[in-house]
Amino acid sequence: MSRTTWRTHRCGALRAEHVGQWVRLGGWVHRRRDLGGIVFLDLRDRDGLVQVAFGPGWSPPDVLVAAGALGSETVVVVEGQIVVRPASARNPEMATGDVEVHATALVVVGPAETPPIPVARGKTDELPAEELRLKHRHLDLRRPELLANLILRHRLMQRARRTLSELEFLEVETPILTKPTPEGARDYLVPSRLHPGEFYALPQSPQIYKQLLMVAGFDRYFQIARCFRDEDLRYDRQPEFTQIDLEASFVGTEDVYGFVEAVLVALWDEAGHAIERPFPRITWREAMERYGTDKPDLRYEFPIADWTAQVQLLGVPFIEQALRDEARVRGIAVKGGGALSRKDVDQLAEAAKQVGGSGLAWAKRLGDHISGSVAKHFTAEGLGALGVGDGDAALMVVGPDRVTSPVLDRVRMEVIRRLAPAPTRAHAFAWVVDFPLFEPDHETGTPVFAHHPFTSPHPDDVVRLESDPFSCRALHYDAVYNGNELGSGSIRITDPAIQRKVFAHLGLAPGEIEARFGFLLAALQAGTPPHGGFAIGFDRVAMLLAGAGSLRDVIAFPKTTAARALFEGAPAPASPADIAALHIEVK
RNA sequence: GGGGCUGUAGCUCAGCUGGUUAGAGUGCCGGUCUGUCACACCGGAGGUCGCGGGUUCGAGCCCCGUCAGCCCCGCCA
């Protein structure tokens, strides 16, 4: 299979079974060890390394000399015989370490300048700065770790395709040049040359198209879809990213959970992990109450509890003051929290402040001795009533949920990081369900849609849309894994009247609705099956399964946090002529 | 948009309280070496201390600004 005009085998594939064979190899000079009379070369290709030996007993003199002069990362073609290494010279750390190539010919086919960043690294060497790795991406990608990440990514992608195809999903491509959307993330815009003053948008997701495919009767659609969002980046957010996007007709939430679980189980299997279905369910409300987040890490305990009633009785002054309106006292009974040092607690409080908290009240229980910022208000029995045993600690905050939830989420994760308890399981998947349909606007507090405007309200809650919007649930669900959101989906609105109401709720005038979404509304009036779907954040899945520290390590050519491509230098200024042709001006 | 960390040799880093000649490892160049595998040993070259300004007798070090990379908040339907 790997045999070509230029070579007979891949370097990393050679084993004891090849001994005696004449081979021709092509690869990169990974490392060279020149002992004077004998020269060793580690030759590298996609499959790995093999040692090539040049010696006076088998290599012609000119080949021996040439081997001694090879620089790192030079591409060479080598001919020779596979031989067993002397017993004392075997290398059990190399897959090919029982054999070597006795080279009889050597041709430099791709000379290389000394690389600005090393490809071959010592075991303890630090990686070069990320800036340099991105600038010289062709070299960084030669590193076996990065190559392995991208090979895994390839396998995951093939497995997703196969799994969905077997579930009768049809892979359909949708446009990259599309139409701006009214809400959500900022769009990447593409000016139209043919239509002055008009713009395409790159898709934030294929959302509308996949719904149109359901209207068209495709029944089940999927796509490994590129998506674009012009927002600020994070280690797990790139401006262009890949989703495993799917949609199906005549489905309810349970059907979608089944499809998505099938894909996720397959992907984890591909990475060598057996996981169980069905995934447990947790409501959004419960997740927020117990973990302070809609993507809880369920590998660990340390749930958040409401201590308002118990703590109120103690008459702690600053808590009394803060306990008004919708404020509650919420806390975590940290098993083994006695091991947290004063410094640890200070750093927890600091972390709490980073997410908007004002402080962290704490008490440690060691025997009868209570210490901590609110120690004088508590007895051992009082702490015991909160679930704080001997050797444990109580961490608590007071305030409205919108403050205490993110603070306790952060505190909980920091506590887990510091105490490093054994996880209850390695792979904690869950469905987070019953998301609210609305969330309060950050400035005005008025209800705004929490999801995209095609998400169906929960049928049981529709009657309260006007009277009590915040109590209404959406048919929206997230898949969560070890504290990471893997993706989200929903059952869609198929009633054009309801869809119009939702658009109106977004502040769109009837004329605007027709202009922007007339095509969707027309489609919904053309005979629409009930449908819903999901989108899995594929890059994030690849990152987690590769054990990578950032999305950049599972994307061949990623952007920096400033959305620049350092290798090719994008974005870049355009020529005045090109700009003029697009009927736009640059200020 | 806001905050934090980092920026010194090709690469990874050290550089004390501001002090006169800025170091180490590795890579690179030259040499010795026939079983190495991060080969070993000897010698050598290599610096716009990110950039601009300021304070000072004197700045890699202090101050202001700026650029880049990373991390966090906002943002990401």
Image: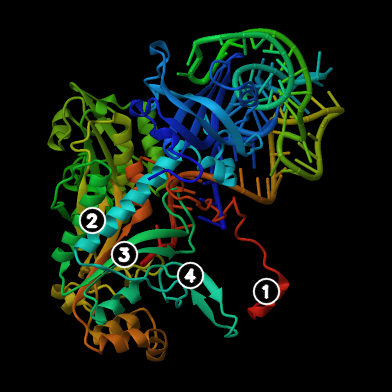
Q: Chain of mark 1?
A: A
Quarter the C terminus of chain A occupies: bottom right
To the question of a shared chain for discs 4 and 1, the answer is yes
Left or right side of A515 for A300: left
Label pair 2/3, CB-CB below 8 angstroms: no
Disc 4 marks which amino acid? Answer: Asp
Eyeballing the image, is A193 above or below A324?
Answer: below
Residue A554 visible in the current orientation: yes
Residue depth check, mark 2 versus mark 4: number of the one nearer the observer: 2
Q: Which residue is mark 4?
A: A187
Residue B11 percent coordinates (x, y): 61, 33
Label pair 1/2, CB-CB below 8 angstroms: no
Disc 3 marks which amino acid? Answer: Asp
To the question of a shared chain for discs 4 and 3, the answer is yes
Q: Chain of mark 4?
A: A
- Residue A212, picture quadrant: bottom left
Q: Which residue is mark 1?
A: A578
Left or right side of A471 for B4: right
- Which type of secondary structure does the marked residue at label 2 adopt? helix
Q: Chain of mark 3?
A: A
- Residue B75, picture quadrant: bottom left
Disc on the earlier residue, 4 or 1: 4
- Which type of secondary structure does the marked residue at label 3 adopt? strand
Q: Which residue is mark 2?
A: A263
